[in-house]
Amino acid sequence: MNIKNNLSLIFGISIPILMIILVTLSIYVPQFFVKPQYDFLYLIGNNNCYTDRNNTQIYSVQNNKVVKNVQDDAVQRCTAGQIPQPKIFRYDVVANKSTEVSFDDVKNLTVDSSPKSPDGFEIIRGSNSGGFFPFYFYSGSDYNSRYINGRNVSKKLNLQQDGYNFVLLGWIK
């Protein structure tokens, strides 16, 4: 086989192969170098306590601190009324795991309540896509899954419980 005679054939076959390799590298290489740096706090459960017809959040962030907005007796009235009290979790982005923490553990932490972390990441919900023809090409749904997304990287979070009542409190500084 003479390479000079088949140069255009070799060139024509190598271009699509090189394009596939470049696209694959551009998708998978950034996740090795770009990683989120800030842990975050989140709630699972109902963060609203209905007392005296007021919709009051139990936990929130004010002046970069996590605060408890209602008194313990009001929380107990809500719990007696079958409104479950939310649980606070701390998510470790390096270990990719969350642990339940108490209010006393987090009340002295400095927390940024903005939707984006200082390094540009945010928590997003999974998609709820059935495809173009849902009866023939149904691909499932991960709508209740959460992802940390930013800087061309997306990673599924390993949350402690389901994401139905997920509330992001803030990013730990």
Image (cartoon, helix red, strand yellow):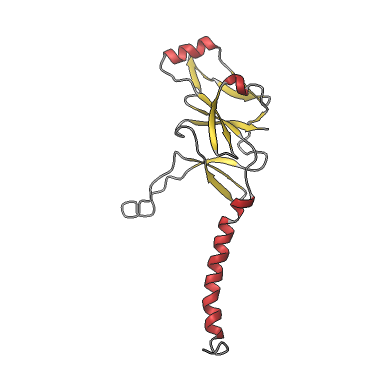
| Residue at the extreme top | 73
Report the residue at 54% width, 81% height from top.
10
Report the residue at 52% width, 40% height from top.
157
Name the one closer to the observer, 116 or 104.
Answer: 104
- Relative to 15, does residue 24 appear above or below in the rendering? above
- Relative to 71, does residue 84 appear above or below in the rendering? below
Report the residue at 31% width, 52% height from top.
135
Image spot of residue 54 (x, y percent): 51, 17
Image spot of residue 72 (x, y percent): 53, 11
Q: Quadrant of the C terminus?
A: top right
Image spot of residue 120 (x, y percent): 65, 43
Q: Is residue 39 left or right of residue 138?
A: right
Q: Is residue 144 left or right of residue 111?
A: left
- Observer able to see residue 52: no
Report the residue at 62% width, 46% height from top.
35
Q: Quadrant of residue 22?
A: bottom right
- Relative to 12, does residue 31 appear above or below in the rendering? above
Image spot of residue 19 (x, y percent): 55, 68
- Observer able to see residue 161: yes
Q: Is residue 33 left or right of residue 147?
A: right
- Relative to 124, does residue 43 appear above or below in the rendering? above
